[in-house]
Image (cartoon, grey):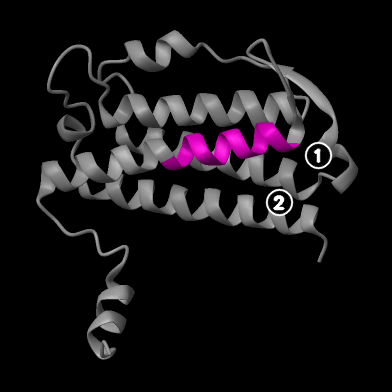
Amino acid sequence: MSVERLFLEYSINKLEQLHSRIRECLNKLGEDEIWARGAENENAIGNLVLHLSGNVRQWIVAGVGGETDTRLRDQEFAARGDTHKQELVDRLSSTVAQAKTVLENLTPAQLTTRITIQKYDVTVLEAVYHVVEHFSQHTGQIIFATKMLTGDDLGFYKHLKAAAHAETTP
């Protein structure tokens, strides 16, 4: 497998993994918890999900894939509970699926193509890297907020706990 294809496959797999974790978080929360915020300058989990959907759609689906950019970024942060949990889940799932299709159809040569997104002049590779990194950051915020709201261990790394206890340290 070429380095380029390896990069794209890893990017797809990482987006799917992070998307799955967000979905698990949303499924543990009620509507009020999804839109809870400690202060007006903080983002609720719902805002972060809208923001990730907008970012992935703008950067990958539109910016890389050539679809029309319909993003209204300010509205992602202005929302205050008007989008229900299932709609958030469905919107993010649809966007990640569209992005996956775009990434699966990229050729290695396209990764060095220059494009402009949000007034940034980047290569397609940089756009993909930006999206995965950005998605990861906000997924961490969503996981942290979910743990704070529920008090639950989400178990994403339980496989490491068992392995760590089975090993002996020299």
Give the image location of residue 163, x and y in percent: 31, 83
Q: Residues within 10 Å of mark 1 (few under 14, many from 20)?
A: some
Amino acid beneath label 1: Leu
Q: Which residue is at 68% across, 57% downward?
A: 9
Q: Main secondary structure of the magenta part?
A: helix
Answer with left or right where residue 47 lies relative to residue 120. Answer: left
Q: Nearer the viewer, residue 128 or 65?
A: 128
In this rendering, would 56 be left or right of 38? right
Q: Residue most toward the front?
A: 170
Which label number is shown at residue 37? none
Residue 43 shows in this picture: yes
Three-letter residue code for mark 2: Leu
Q: How many marks?
A: 2
Q: Is residue 58 magenta?
A: no
Q: As displayed, is residue 21 above or below residue 170?
A: above
The residue positioned 34% from the left and 24% from the top of the image is 47
Task: Indicate the quadrant where residue 10 lies.
Answer: bottom right
Question: Which residue sits furthest right?
Answer: 109
Residue 68 is left or right of residue 79, and the answer is right
Q: Residue at x 57, y 35 (%)?
A: 131
- Mark 2 lies on a secondary structure that is helix
Q: Is residue 135 magenta?
A: yes
Q: Name, please, the residue furthest toward the left.
A: 151
Marks 1/2 in contact by CB < 8 Å: the verdict is yes
Label disc, if present, on residue 8 of the rendered structure: 2
> Residue 65 location in percent, x, y?
76, 31
Q: CA distance from mark 1 to mark 2?
A: 9 Å
Disc 1 or 2, which lies upstream in sequence? Answer: 2
Residue stretch rendered in magenta on the structure: 125-136
**Residue underneath mark 1:** 111
